Amino acid sequence: MLRKSPFNRKKILIGVTGGIAAYKIPQLVRILKKEGAEVQVVLTESAKIFVTPQTLAVLSERPALSQFFKSDQGEWNNHVHLGLWADLIIIAPAGANTLAKIAHGICDNLLMSVILSARCPVFVAPAMDLDMWTHPSTQANIETLIERGVTLIDPEEGSLASGLEGKGRMAEPENIAKTLANHLTPAHNYFFGKRVLVTAGGTQEPIDPVRFIGNHSSGKMGFAIAEQLLSLGAEVELVYGSVSVTPPKESNNHQALTAKAMQQTCEQLFPQCDILIMAAAVADYHPTELASEKIKKSDNTLTLTLEKNPDILKTLSASRKPNQVCIGFALETEQEELHAQQKLQKKNLDCIVLNTLKNPQAGFAVDTNEVTLYCRDGQQFHIPANQKNQVAATMLQILGEWLNKPQS
Ligand code: PMT
């Protein structure tokens, strides 16, 4: 399944250097793309003798880059940006010359500049003739690279382009992909392969055919959480009310506009889920009566009678199996911490995420948020103001680490 692939939505930069094994890289690109990765190829001039940039560009669906400058107008391929963009860099095939250059920080082409600018894990899949591979210089360079945190994908034994037999063949693309997949599926990724029910947006409680009681929720926070979960390899059931943004394509999306509809949808989905994260702003009340026609303006005042909505989070949490995790959000305008802690207890949650409304750039509708997590064991984690997708990423990282620890 695509969404369970560790490559799903990962940004992989493939550095291709000159060597006959470069002809296998289109296959590596195809595997990674099929698994849902975004692939950017950067190749050296000598790689172009063995594989065309056109082939790599078509398969990766991005231009295959080799030059700093795109045109004589000065438009350039920003190596720092490329280095920071990647979640992972794999250099395949990595020739003896390239290994030596990386080990010594020689920066004479776009690929080398990208590697020196990278903050992500770097893998090398060497390919060369057997005597070059066993040469003390190459081995010393490999040792240096490993010491600095580069991961070696060992060359394989077999027939070499020189006609000799021995170690030096680049690992097959399938084996390179397997090594990268293992790296991207670390044991500490709590969410990988989990099914998560996420709610987002605000509910609308109809008064008559044209009016409703609603709130300002845009769905941005809930959708950001769903996006990040997908990146972590989770399967996401996304239930949302009224929103102003588009839900992710890869989640299973269900729109439910009223609290009652949201409750019904969540109740159907929750038994098959491992985790519930309720970021939706659910109306606490709905009008007792729904007028069949538009209510006419007559008296100076109009009285609506409201009836309490079900508390979806509380109901789901009460029905949960021992291994299901329930996380709520809290939106408070006064005594925030006290009320959040009370909700944590009353709704029997593992954690509640309190929006810090003292910051005008937090909470409803805006692109940013600032939150504090209150966990059931008393631990608290503050996440400073940032874009909602960044807050969601940090929140899931904290929660993943917290949930991975033995729970009391
Ligand atoms: O959508 P955005 O514009 O990005 O804004 C994000 C957000 C501010 C809406 C989000 O971060 C948030 O805080 N969502 C929860 C808002 C809320 O309803 O808080 P509450 O304190 O009223 O409810 C506590 C929890 O109970 C929430 O998880 C809520 O989903 C849940 N609840 C509330 C009422 C109800 N009848 N059923 C519920 O399940």
Image (cartoon, rainbow, N blue to C red):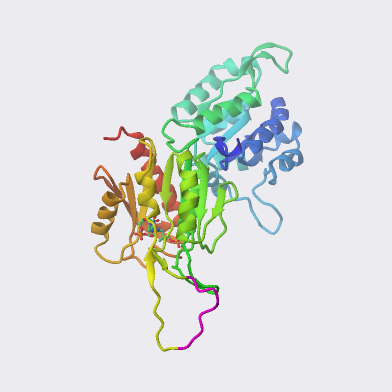
How many numbered callouts? Answer: 0
Residue 35 visible: yes
Q: Quadrant of residue 284?
A: bottom left
**Which stretch did the figure color magenta?**
290-298
Q: Nearer the viewer, residue 382 or 192?
A: 192
x, y percent for residue 323: 38, 35
Is 161 left or right of 392, judged from the image as shown?
right
Q: Quadrant of residue 407?
A: top left
Does the magenta run of residues contain 148?
no
Q: For the point 49% across and 45% down, which residue is it?
A: 269
Is 132 left or right of 349, judged from the image as shown?
right
Q: For the point 36% across and 58% down, which residue is it?
A: 370
x, y percent for residue 191: 45, 38
Is 129 left or right of 209, judged from the image as shown?
right
Q: For the point 42% across and 64% down, which residue is it?
A: 364
Is 298 drawn above or below residue 2 in the view shown? below
Q: Nearer the viewer, residue 358 or 135?
A: 358
x, y percent for residue 106: 55, 36
x, y percent for residue 139: 53, 19
Quadrant containing ligand 1 reads: bottom left
